[in-house]
Structure formats: C-alpha cells, structure tokens
C-alpha cells in the first residue's frame, strides 16, 4: 500500500520487527470505529478553531493570537511526528493534534475571513463536499487506488512538499517562490493543482483504512487512521482557502 500522506505509509500496519500484521488484544480495527474517531477528532478541531476565531474578532485583530498560531502550528507538527513514530500513543496524541491544529486553523481562517468575508464557509463547504464526493466515487468503484494511481499521487505530493520546503528555506533569506503566494494566473493554477493532489490523497487514505480493516489491525489503529485522514483534510482545507483567496483578490 502506498499513500501520499506521510502518516499513512506502506509499513503503518506492519510490525517493524517481523513485517507481520500486529493484532491487538482488545479487538481489531473496524470501519465504524474509525469513522467515529474521525468524527470526534473533527469536533475537537472545530472546538479549537472556534476558540481562536472568537478571540480574533473579540480582540479586533491578531495581537493576542500569535502564541496560539505558533503554538498550534509548531506544537501540532511535533505531536504529528510523535504520532507517526509512536502509533500506539495515537489514542492520546491524535486528539491533542486535533486541538492544536484547531487553534492554528481557527486563527488563520479568521485572518482570511476579515480580508475576504464569506471565504471560510465556502472553503469548509468545498472541503467536505470534496470529501463526500470522493468517498462516494471510491465506494462505487468510479475511482480505484491502483498501484500506478498511488505512485502518481505519492510523487506529486512529494514534489509539492519539496517545493514548500524550498520556499520556507528561501524565506530565511528574505525571498520566496512568487507563484506560491501571488494571485496571478500562474499562482491560481498552482493552487488548483495542489488542491487536486490533496483531494486525491483522500482516495489513498480511504484505500489504506479499508486495507487496515481487512488485515485486522489492532484497535488503536482506528485512532491512528483517523489522525491520518485529519491530516489530509486540514491540508485540503488550507489549500482551498488559499485558492479562493487568490481568486477573490483578482475581483
């Protein structure tokens, strides 16, 4: 199994020592359990987002938000890395990641909303609309996660990640890759491609979760799988937000 999501990779459901599937004592991973835990993580993310969203508009700006923005972004990254390397901790670390990322995206969303009124609801609607449409297409067999499909999405995701990393490094020297941030047609086309790639990662996540259920992965992997899906959803939402802001800035 190959996934562009770094949290859901080929060896996730395998014991690193033997290469065999690890089965939990408290039962096996189920689809319903994964869905329920994904819903819980979304609620936690929403709670965190609402807190910084309300703080932004009650304080009249970003003055009191930077600790939450930095703490959410950096803390979320650290917790995500811990979760990837310590999957058994995911029942604790996955909700913690959701809360931290909620603080971050709530603040970021408020900033976009202040500049482009109505953009956040559009981005939320498009994110969950995309999730629903791709889930339906996957379940109906219209989209199949073949090996070539997985390889293509994995390569595209890696290329985007490398480009973003280069842009971050360039930022330390006071420059950046223009089309990542600018609202010209090249910038819009780039953001549109990134949104498509992020959306296609959902298909790989669906396939990966289904495979984990079929292999009888341990129960805690429901939390880990839900965490991996949340990572993709947050990425997709932020990229849709960026794309919409570029489109509206041209009006």
Image (cartoon, rainbow, N blue to C red):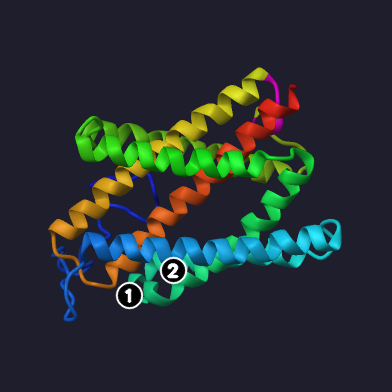
Disc 2 versus disc 1: nearer the observer: 2
Tell me if residue 174 can be seen. no
Q: Give the range drawn in magenta.
A: 180-184
Would you place residue 154 above or below residue 214 in this image? above
124 or 166, which is in the foreground? 124
For image coordinates 23% across by 59% down, the residue present is 31
Circle 1 crowding by C-alpha within 10 Å: few under 14, some 14–19, many from 20: some
SS at badge 1: helix
List the residue tagged with mark 2: 94
47 or 237, which is in the foreground? 47
What's the distance in space between the residues labelled 2 and 1, CA to CA?
Answer: 11 Å
For image coordinates 45% across by 31% down, the residue present is 196
23 or 133, which is in the foreground? 133
List the residue tagged with mark 1: 88
If you read the primary sequence from the N terminus, does the residue marked by circle 2 or circle 1 appear first?
A: 1
For image coordinates 34% across by 70% down, the residue present is 87
Tell me if residue 88 can be seen. yes
User: Is residue 209 highlighted in magenta?
Assistant: no
């Amino acid at each position: 199994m190959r996934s562009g999501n770094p949290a859901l990779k080929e060896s996730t459901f395998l014991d690193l020592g033997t290469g065999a599937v690890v089965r939990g004592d408290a039962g096996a991973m189920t689809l319903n359990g994964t869905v329920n835990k994904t819903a819980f993580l979304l609620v936690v993310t929403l709670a965190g987002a609402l807190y910084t969203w309300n703080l932004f508009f009650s304080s009249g700006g970003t003055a009191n938000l930077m600790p939450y923005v930095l703490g959410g972004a950096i803390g979320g990254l650290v917790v995500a890395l811990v979760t990837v390397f310590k999957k058994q901790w995911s029942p604790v670390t996955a909700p913690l990641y959701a809360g931290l990322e909620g603080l971050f995206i709530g603040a970021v969303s408020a900033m976009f909303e202040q500049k482009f009124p109505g953009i956040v609801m559009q981005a939320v609607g498009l994110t969950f609309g995309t999730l629903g449409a791709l889930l339906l297409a996957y379940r109906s067999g219209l989209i199949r996660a073949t090996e070539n499909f997985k390889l293509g999405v994995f390569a595209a995701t890696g290329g985007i990640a490398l480009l973003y990393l280069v842009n971050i490094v360039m930022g330390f020297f006071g420059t950046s890759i223009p089309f990542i941030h600018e609202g010209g047609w090249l910038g819009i086309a780039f953001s549109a491609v990134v949104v498509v790639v992020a959306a296609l990662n959902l298909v790989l996540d669906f396939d990966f979760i289904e495979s984990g259920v079929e292999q009888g992965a341990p129960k805690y992997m429901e939390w880990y799988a839900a965490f991996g899906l949340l990572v993709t959803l947050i990425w997709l939402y932020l990229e849709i937000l960026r794309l919409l802001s570029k489109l509206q800035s041209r009006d």
